[in-house]
Amino acid sequence: MKIVFCIDDNPRYLMLAKVAVRSLRRLYGADVPVLCVYGGTCGETVESMERERIPVAVYAPQLNHKTVPRGFHRAIGAFLKLELALVPELADEDFVLYSDSDMYFHARFDELLAMRPPYMAMAREASAPFYHDVQEMHYTYRDRRYTVPLPFPIWTFSSGVVNFNLSRLRRHDHIHNFLAFCLQNVHHIGNLDQSLLNYFFGKQVTKLPPRFNCPPYRTEAREEGCLIHFHGPKPWDIRPDLWKDLRIHHYSWFRERWFELLSADEAELVHSWE
Ligand SMILES: [Mn+2]
């Protein structure tokens, strides 16, 4: 199964994606199939990934700077994962494992790669309660009006790691139905792409065990975690006042492991972000 990352033009996410792939290759070898879906237009970003031997799919998303409200533009790359079923380079893939770039692959996760969920599989996000301002959402698709009632789950799934059943999303053009919902409701969601997935697919999401999307601040992260998600503080976010309550337990240990995968020049650059 291909492991897919998504990036935009943010250089910090480019660095995160490179290091994530280095940690992944340490566990699964240099030939582990990866793809980086890139939603920008900067040749330098593509070259930088190619130097790292990471194949890049340049993709022009429907959820873009024109259709997504300005307040979300700083994290526009987060929406790319919603369109993986439409990326030509993934047309032959029935399933893909999407991973956020702020990931450190700590231990093998064969079971996750073998999973074939009916729609998608995601782990529960412990720190974000399910929250919404409205009781239902509406959208129109092919001249029919649909209502998405809220709330349904009592928790939120994290979109940091998603095993996507792409062939299911392509069947009956389900993906275009979903994107119609996204484009018409993106203006009143709270938490980027994650809200859209939770609102639309809530009950159809298969729940993953926490070890497949484990923040470094959880007590069990080092012993049991497989995919360590720098959700919250990134490896360079060590200013005393920043994310203090989340830089606990194994955060510093994993931050050190992450830095070990950088060259001296890269480490210098990353330290300048602290
Ligand atoms: Mn993340």
Image: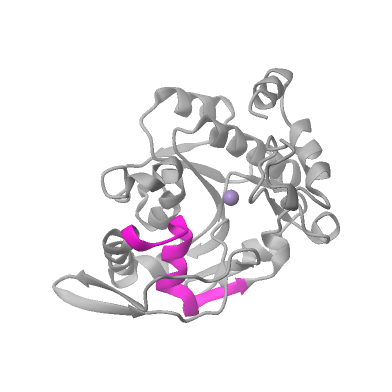
Relative to residue 223, is residue 20 drawn left or right? left
Q: Is residue 172 above or below residue 158?
A: below
Q: Is residue 198 magenta?
A: yes
- Count of all numbered marks drawn on residues in the image: 0
In the current view of this chain or complex, which residue is farthest to the front?
A: 241
- Residue 31, position in %: x, y? 64, 41
Q: Is residue 185 left or right of residue 203?
A: left
**Magenta residue span:** 187-207
Residue 133 vs residue 184: left or right?
right
Spot occupied by residue 177 in the image (x, y as percentages of width and height):
28, 68
Quarter holding residue 132: bottom left
> Which residue is at 64% across, 40% downward?
21
Task: Using the image, determine if residue 93 lies above or below residue 124.
Answer: above
Residue at horizontal 67%, vertical 59%?
213
Q: Where is residue 171, by image quadrant?
A: bottom left
Magenta span main SS: helix
Q: Quadrant of the C terminus?
A: top right
Q: Quadrant of residue 24?
A: top right
181 vs 98, nearest the viewer: 181
Residue appearing at x 82%, y 50% in the figure: 250
Residue 166, position as x, y percentages in the image: 43, 63
Examine the rendering and report whether any part of residue 263 can be seen. Answer: yes
Which residue appears farthest toward the right when viewing the image? 223
* Residue ID at (49%, 70%): 131
Q: Is residue 24 above or below residue 12?
A: below
The answer to whether residue 91 is seen in the rendering is no
The one of 27 and 59 positioned closer to us in this rendering: 59
Magenta-span inclusion, residue 103: no
The N terminus lies in which quarter of the figure? bottom right
Where in the figure is residue 155, as x and y percent of width and height?
57, 74
- Color theme of the render: one colour
Q: Horizontally, is 130 left or right of 80 in the view?
A: right
